[in-house]
Image (cartoon, helix red, strand yellow):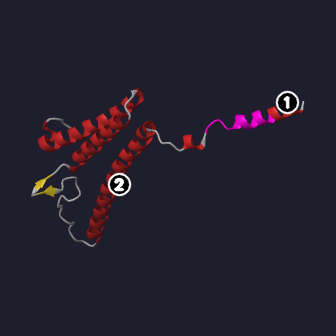
Amino acid sequence: MSEMGNLEVMCVNCALVKHSAQEHFTVEAKYVVSYFVPALFFLFLSLRWSFLMLTRWKEFASDHQLELAGLPPTPEVGGWTGCLTVCGQPMPWEGLFKILLSTSAIGATVLLNLDSTNIMIVTMYGFFLISGLIDLLVFSCGYLVLPE
């Protein structure tokens, strides 16, 4: 009877430990693709958008202060409107940023782990890629292609 009691105690202790500690610290590629890459994608998009909104707010606040003082507003240089100039030519930075970010996210998703669940994530990046291409199209052709 005492042997039976020892076996029950040993079985209870063994049943509590099913996995080793090493199994919990491995990072699988599917988790990186499913959680980390989209998080970085949206983090960079939101940081860019926040930067643009803060600079527009700063410009608006400065112009409002000038208006209260009776002075004319500062002339637009085109610096923070999404058309920074390179060699004198304006560039569509918003569209280029979307295209660069979405293609790098698609590349990371495909290279790390591509299965049926990640196809939805690639599709999401694809729509941002299409949005960036439309931004470039509107920038180069104006609203002749896509009317308001």
- From the image, give the main secondary structure of the stretch colored magenta: helix
Please tell me whether mark 2 sits on a helix, a strand or a loop.
helix
Rounded to the nearest angstrom, the CA distance separating label 1 from label 2 is 67 Å
Q: Residue 16 in magenta?
A: yes
Q: Image point 55% across, 40% down: which residue?
A: 23
Q: Does residue 48 appear left or right of residue 89 in this picture?
A: right
Q: Amino acid at mark 1?
A: Met
Query: Residue furthest toward the right?
Result: 1
Q: Amino acid at mark 2?
A: Ser
Query: Residue furthest toward the top?
Result: 116
Q: Position of residue 128 (x, y in %)?
A: 30, 38
Q: Image point 18% across, 53% down: which residue?
A: 83
Asked which quadrant contains residue 79, the reply is bottom left
Q: Does residue 90 appear left or right of residue 129 in this picture?
A: left
| Pointer 2 residue | 50
Q: Residue 58 in magenta?
A: no
Q: Image point 29% across, 61% down: which residue?
A: 60
| Depth check, front residue: 37 or 13 | 13
Q: Position of residue 11 (x, y in %)?
A: 76, 33
| Pointer 1 residue | 4
Counting residues from the start of the chain, the first of labels 1 and 2 encountered is 1
Q: Image point 36% across, 29% down: which residue?
A: 119
> Which residues are the magenta region?
8-19
